[in-house]
Image: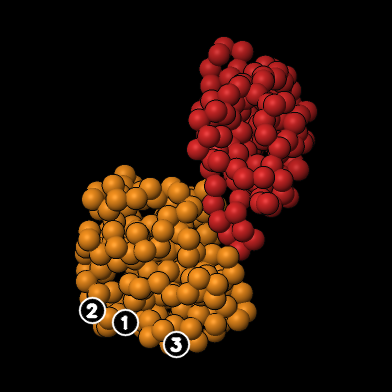
Chain colours: A red, B orange
Amino acid sequence: MSVDIQDLHQQWVGAECGSSSYDVNTDRLLAFANACGETDPRFIDPEDAEFQSTPGFTTIIVSGQGSEALPKDFPQFKGRSIDGGKSVEIHHPIRPGDTLTGKQTIADIYEKTGRSGKMVFVVHRTEFTNQDDQPVTTVDWRWITNLVED
Amino acid sequence: MTILDLHSHSIKSDDGRAKVENYCQWIQKKELPLDGIVLTEHRQFDATSDYRDLEDRFGIAIMKASEVETDYGHVLVFGVNEDLVNEFDFARIDNSLATVLAAAQRCGAVAAPCHPGRVNVGLFAHYATKGPVPGVKLVEVYNGGSRPGEDEFSETEAAKYNYLGFGGSDSHIVSRIGYCATRFDDDITDITDLVAALKSERFEAVSFRS
């Protein structure tokens, strides 16, 4: 399968992938912070005046979806796909009691070459807002396919 | 004399995990013998970032270049300017090496293949199937990300084609900066000096890998 990145970019960047809702509570924040080995009281002490989520907290909401996070009719590439990791931009603290809404879109599609050949990167973006419609985080998740071209 | 790491990536590259400030802190803390670094972000030229404050704080020259992708593998471009950015699409992975070399020359820049001994993305892998490209003058013979044998292959082939060799770490994480570098006879403080020094051919690749 030959992949035309420019066509893909034109057709799919900006496409909506769906949305999800997530209720934040103290137990979830603590579990993630402790799993990360955090020691800062802001993240592990619910009595701390600034108690909030660790910076990477919203990545767990995005995790585990695999290619199912992409639109159903998104092209299937021939090749081996891997999770290219996530980056998080923090806009506002997340606190217990918040209800987050994550709006998911395809933010970018690009290609590069490496030792193993040609790769396609799909950047899946989730923009989280809280119950006041205030942006809290933006999570960019890169889905990489090492293309096998005919 | 000046020692520069000519090949590094910051978080401006999609696979870079190092902030420029952290590179500076690492160089200072480890007392690495570097006078400066060159940021060669993938498939782009970062025209907006301003690192002058870091240069002043750490006494390290921080220059900006690019790593572009061509039909003969990856190529570093030093001395990128507005004219050159308009000559070809830095974001593409299928630029013609001949085009990149010619455009760089026209615009007063220097284009040089990096990690030429690497499969798929190295110059010499492509030479094996497509033959040499006129206009190549220097290649990165020491690359901090090379696997065993790659740099040796690069050196052998560079000698065969009479190419000059330079070095760079290809660092994507802080602790890799300075693995390989280039020692210049001249004093170099900015990208204009660097381009002139590369054209002068008074330099050699050095490795600080233990």
Marks 2 and 3: in contact by CB < 8 Å?
no
Answer yes or no: do the residues labelled 2 and 1 have beta carbons within 8 Å?
Answer: yes
User: Is residue A3 visible from the viewing direction of this image?
Assistant: yes
Q: CA distance from mark 2 to mark 1?
A: 8 Å
Q: Label for residue B203? A: 1
Q: Secondary structure at mark 1?
A: strand
Asked whether A133 or B124 is in front, the reply is B124
- Looking at the rendered structure, the secondary structure element under dot 3 is helix
Q: Residue at x 23, y 79 (%)?
A: B200
Compute the Cα span from label 3 to label 2. 21 Å
Residue at 27% x, 53% y is B84
The disc labelled 1 sits on which kind of residue? Phe
Q: Nearer the viewer, mark 3 or mark 2?
A: 3
Between circles 2 and 1, the one closer to the viewer is 2
**Mark 3 vs 2, N-terminal side:** 3
| Drawn side of residue A30 relative to residue B143, left or right | right
Q: Quadrant of the N terminus of chain B?
A: bottom left
Please rate how many residues cluster around mark 2, counting C-alpha atoms within 10 Å: few if below 14, some from 14 to 19, many from 20.
Answer: few
Q: Kindly identify which chain the residue marked by label 3 belongs to.
A: B
Residue B110 rendering spot, x and y as whole percentages: 30, 66
Q: Which of the labelled discs sits on residue B200, or is there none?
A: 2
Q: Is residue A128 visible?
A: no
Q: Quadrant of residue A98?
A: top right
Q: Can you say whether A49 is above or below B107 in the image?
A: above
Provide the chain ID for the residue under circle 1.
B
Q: Which residue type does callout 2 highlight?
A: Ser
Residue drawn 42% across and 69% down?
Answer: B113
Q: Which mark is residue B160?
A: 3
Rendered position, B74 above or below A46 = below
Q: Pick whichever of labels 3 and 1 is earlier in the sequence.
A: 3
